[in-house]
Image: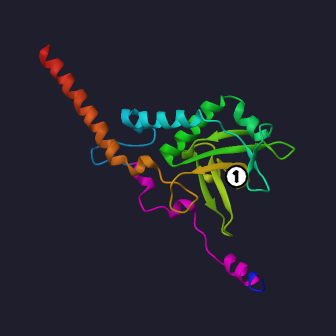
Amino acid sequence: MKRLPSILKRKEKRNYQSAANLAAPGFTASLQVPSIAGILVTPQTALTFTAYYGAVRVITEDKASLPFLVFQRQADGGSKLEAAHPVSYLFRRSPDGETTSLNWRESYTSHVLGWGNAYAEIEWNSEGYPESLHMIHPSVILPKRTGEGKLYYELQTAIGSRADGRYRNIPPWRILHFAGLGFNGLVGYSPVALARESIGLGKAAEQFGALHIEHERGSAA
């Protein structure tokens, strides 16, 4: 126990970087330049590739159709279903008060499959329970750290500069963040970015086939 203060003291001196800066060089930029096949591949455009869309639809629909319940851990190591828990009620009805639980979880999971991360801002009630979960698109929010190493989430509320006040910093206790496979446990890799050459090749083959059919029809006419 005598070593604990010195350990904490050394930890305070560590220099943290923005979580985004820890990604492999060019990883995020790969979503902004065309693949070798000449096709721009992003989580949105990838959905127009039938194979990718089919896989995303199967995963999101099957996962969202499963029950989402809260269990309380028991002293004997078992668990007890808490059907009346506010969180269970939230996901039985509507996480945001606007969509069904199934549709909400479908979209949330699709963000992970496309961007590698899914985010929602938590609205807490006076009793300390989550009252609603407002989904945030992964393209406008980014986990970062302050100079002291504290985690926060930077939300872009509109197109503009930070000087315009169009960015809002949100503490982590107000964000529900699910990260897929990643490099630091905080930010997930984008599956689309990792597979962009395969998706781009598939899209290029589709376009080539469509152009060939159009050409054949023109020749027949």
Tell whether 83 sits left or right of 164.
Answer: right
- The reply to whether the magenta stretch includes residue 21 is yes
| Residue at the image point whose x is 50% and y is 46% from the top | 115
Tell whether 69 sits left or right of 181.
Answer: right
Instruction: Indicate whether 28 appears above or below 55.
Output: below
- Residue furthest to the left: 219
**Quarter holding residue 133:** top right
Tell whether 34 sits left or right of 219.
Answer: right
Q: Amino acid at mark 1?
A: Ile
On the rendered image, what quadrant is the N terminus found in?
bottom right
Instruction: Indicate whether 155 appears above or below 208.
Output: below
**Quarter holding residue 83:** top right
Instruction: Indicate whether 211 appears above or below 117.
Output: above
The residue that disc 1 covers is 170
- Percent across and percent down for residue 137 are 58, 42
- Percent across and percent down for residue 6 are 73, 84
The residue stretch that appears in magenta: 5-32
Q: Front-most of 65 and 184? A: 65
Label 1 packing within 10 angstroms: few (<14), some (14-19), many (20+): some
